[in-house]
Image (cartoon, rainbow, N blue to C red):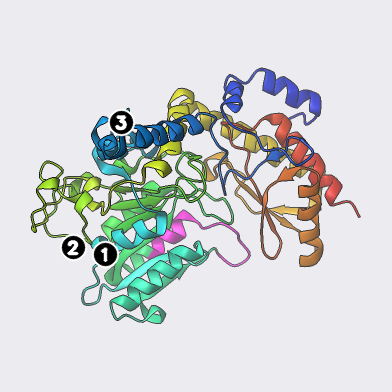
Amino acid sequence: MEFSAADAARRDAADPLARFAAEFHLPHDDAGRRLTYLCGHSLGLQPKSAAGFVDQELGDWRRLGVLGHTQALRPWIAYHEAAAAPLARLAGALESEVVAMNSLTVNLHLMMVSFFRPAGSRHCVLMEKSAFPSDRYAVVSQLQYHGLDPQTSLIEVEPRPGERSLRTEDLVECIGREAPRLALVLLPGVQYLTGQALDLAPLTAAARAAGAAVGLDLAHAIGNTPLRLHDWSADFAVWCSYKYLNAGPGAVGGCFVHERHAHSLTLPRFTGWWGHDKSARFRMQPGFEAMAGAEGWQISNPPILSMAPLLASLQVFDAADLRRLRDKSLSLTAYLHDGIARSLGAAVQILTPPEGHARGCQLSLRINRPPHAARRCHELLRAAGVLGDWREPDVLRLSPVPLYNSYADVFTAVQALADALRP
């Protein structure tokens, strides 16, 4: 693979998805220089259409007041329903299995209320040891809420000594070995620190065979990697929408509940009026009757101004098509991987698996220098106009997102990182 500015330009000229970068606001610094943005794994860029979506709701609110609930261009009472079909396409799910609501950790707590049901010897949650801290905080607090000791009821799995990635066979073996104790298996779609994409089909199958409930954190997977949640048969999944879904900082999150639970009368849940049968919601009766499907786990009416940018972004995803985006992503990230290997050598260690099927957009790089010097490289990279993000003490994460990044972005980033690493 050639790695040069000319080669990057040729690839961009031949890219059928290159036009979608014009659908997003690309960041600039104070001097007007366009920044090379490789941080979509942390916060996706703003779709240019998002302002129009928000302005529409502000205008309808201004013009209609409370009547906007039924008379707005996109009536607010049913606003969340507009996200169901495009989210289902990204999640590989039925429309009835997904809902946009709350935030990721709130949804995780709500799902654990229903699906973490410790009883007798089955009192353990299995998760990866390097899970995103908010997931671990949520799990530990749920264990404590049930009167359980995390020291004995939390099973944490990690890569083999000297390795960086989790092996599917090791996870399957651990799930089988711990089966009598497992109440819940909670795994990520893409590991946030290393960028490893887990092979979820055999993992969910192993967990279900063990008799455990299965939950997935898809914060770094949805909009990034192909998902088949319905076919994989996980009990639930949760995600945020401000990373690859480009819905804005703190945007409304999402949730999947498999259709086999759509009409469950036995699962406990924390309830609120927006999960109540919508045909009877405004009768204001005391008895709760859950809507079928994931909507039945809603608590409150949707935050309209937060959901508007999500609808804008989902329109772009539908126009681009996730399968085509995935093809470009595999090529872009391989180009980044190859450029780093050629240009930086032993100066960095790539933590993300080299195989395309085992990663999404993100590459995680360990800077092989003392922590203060490694962080200085990140600071120099930012000064050069390349935005990735930093995880202490020495990990730089870079993500070329196929909706708005180019091969030229990748080439620029590698060259800037090479400059930052020079003695």
Residue 368 visible in the snapshot: no
Q: Which mark is residue 283?
A: none
- Reply above or below: 2 against 162: above
Q: Quadrant of residue 306?
A: top left
Which of label 3 and label 1 is nearer to you?
3
Secondary structure at badge 3 equals loop
Quadrant housing the N terminus: top right
Amino acid type, label 3: Ala
Q: Which mark is residue 113?
A: 1
Viewer-side residue, 319 vs 216 = 319
Per the image, the residue denoted by label 3 is: 72
Q: Is residue 237 left or right of residue 290?
A: right
Q: Is residue 18 left or right of residue 203?
A: right
Query: Within the magenta stretch, is there residue 37?
Result: no
Name the residue rendered at 30%, 60% in the picture. Answer: 110
- Neighbour class for label 3 at 10 Å: few (<14), some, many (≥20)? many
Residue 163 in the magenta stretch? The answer is: yes
Image vertical order of residue 125 relative to residue 291, above or below: below
Answer left or right for 295 relative to 200. Answer: left
Q: Amino acid at mark 1?
A: Val
The x, y position of residue 44, in whole percent, is: 55, 42
| Quarter of the C terminus within the rendering | bottom right
Query: Neighbour class for label 2 at 10 Å: few (<14), some, many (≥20)?
Result: some
Q: Earlier in the sequence, mark 1 or mark 2?
A: 1
